[in-house]
Amino acid sequence: MAVADFNQIRRSEHLPARIAAQIAREITEGRISAGEKLPTEHLLSKTFGVSRSVVREAIAHLRNEGLVETRQGVGAFATDIERRQSIRIEQENLSDKASFRSLFQLRLPLEIEAAGLAAIHHTSDDLLKLDEALSQMTGAAKWTDEGILADLAFHRQIAAATQNEYFLLFLGFVAERIHLAINAARASAVLEEIVEVTIAEHLAIRDAIASRQPNQARQAMHEHLVGAASRIELQLEIF
Amino acid sequence: MAVADFNQIRRSEHLPARIAAQIAREITEGRISAGEKLPTEHLLSKTFGVSRSVVREAIAHLRNEGLVETRQGVGAFATDIERRQSIRIEQENLSDKASFRSLFQLRLPLEIEAAGLAAIHHTSDDLLKLDEALSQMTGAAKWTDEGILADLAFHRQIAAATQNEYFLLFLGFVAERIHLAINAARASAVLEEIVEVTIAEHLAIRDAIASRQPNQARQAMHEHLVGAASRIELQLEIF
DNA sequence: CATATAAGGTTATCAGACAACCCTACAAGA
DNA sequence: TCTTGTAGGGTTGTCTGATAACCTTATATG
């Protein structure tokens, strides 16, 4: 018998995570329904054959995820579906090109819609900050870190100008992700020309928003993103 | 001395959460920078004046949030910003009408884009499941729970048909949220007419997707969502 | 020079205890 | 009867101390 069973070997990292996953399955697959009480920590530790510490850590995990609630002296309860609090977007393999492209494709309609909404709802303060970011972009002669940060700030400010918290939250996350990836990819091809084009596109967006013309803002944002995608050789589906 | 100091009393719920918040602040405000090693659990427990269990639970919390990574036998390290894994959408006050409206406004461009992408990328299997959901909607004579679930499944399947994991993930969350809220609101006005209109709209979307006409699918989805919004008396900005 | 081996530090897990808290039931007094 | 006090048992929260698993570094060992 030459070859050992390698699968069996791994101590299967992080015991609490496995326990948590198991309990989570019990809940999401309905064997423990909403509002129902989980077994006590003592019992769980006995049935899983681990110590109470591990069970506690697992339950703490589930509590963070919003799947259970605990009340001292009472017990742990599966949360009602209506009260689940969070969504997670794991980001592990964005280096993977297909996944990156998927995220960019998701960003497209969001940014466009945000530009339109920003044109409607922006305040004078929003516009001020928008211009600030723009001037920092033009100020950074070359495409330094500062320029990229300003670019990011510009898009973030548009999201803020929608006065819609969800746009800000989600676009903030997506945009940062994408910018970081672009940043790495672009380091090789730092061309003055690209910078000028990018700035011009941003300016067009800014003007459309400032003059409160939503459709024009959407159009400008659309062109900008399509241009940005092509600049990093990304093939998107465009409508 | 008649009045006691009530503020002092509260044992200030969940010790680990407070510790976690404190450490998180150390990281996000840069006093512990990316990649740097945190103090050992033993040291932390001594400096905070709590037991190691509490510190461990706090660190576990941070690990779940993606702020730190731990390596057995080595220590805990603050994560590089680029590798933060998750975004959270807290959902507490969606009963609040403005907030609900904001979420619906975010959903609009996503669903429309998803319909377009689904028209391009859907597989025969996707179409099958789409039809299945549709038949369940028409089957449910009145607007029962079953009908609502089928409605939800229909939209979910469109998101899946984009072959874009992010659309599925995000639309799944948003749509479920919104459906639940609508469900509650609509209970009073269960009209046959509404059901028929809704089904007709869904059918239009389905046909456009099936015939692989993205723009038509987008148009149909657009009309459906506008209709749905008006049916629950929601004022959206439409372009 | 390459490989073992040992030592020390750190996290992971365990075990058992006590504290804080909740719920229920029952007793005592009005 | 109603309210209030009290006791008891059960559960989570926290503490303490110990052991196992693991990593890093230094020190032999051939």
Image (cartoon, coloured by chain):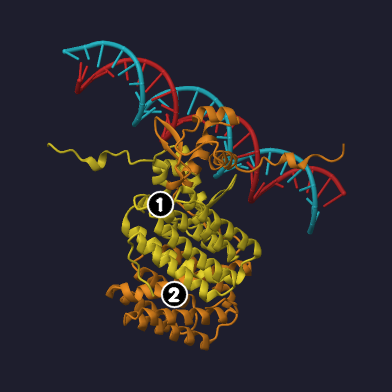
Chain colours: A yellow, B orange, C red, D cyan
Q: How many marks?
A: 2
Residue B70, image quadrant: top left
Q: Position of residue D20 (x, y in %)?
A: 36, 28
Quadrant that contains the N terminus of chain B: top right
Q: Furthest-bottom residue in view?
A: B193
Residue A43 lies left or right of residue B15; in this view the side is: left
Marked residue chain, label 2: B
How far separated are the C-alphas under marks 2 and 1? Answer: 30 Å
Q: Position of residue B218 (x, y in %)?
A: 42, 78
Is residue A208 or residue B205 the one in the foreground? A208
Same-chain check, marks 2 and 1: no
SS class, disc 1: helix
Q: Position of residue C14 (x, y in %)?
A: 42, 33
Residue under circle 2?
A: B112
| Residue at x-position 49% and y-position 75% | B145
Q: Furthest-left residue in view?
A: A1
Q: Residues within 10 Å of mark 1 (few under 14, many from 20)?
A: some
| Residue at x-position 59% and y-position 73% | A212
Whether residue B11 is situated above or below residue B90 in the rendered picture:
above
Inspect the image, locate mark 2, and give the three-letter code of the amino acid beneath it. Ile
- From where the camera sits, is residue B214 visible? yes
Inspect the image, locate mark 1, and give the three-letter code of the amino acid beneath it. Asn
Q: Residues within 10 Å of mark 2 (few under 14, many from 20)?
A: many
| Residue at x-position 40% and y-position 30% | B74
Residue B119 lies left or right of residue A86; in this view the side is: left
Q: Nearer the viewer, mark 2 or mark 1?
A: 1
Residue under circle 1?
A: A183
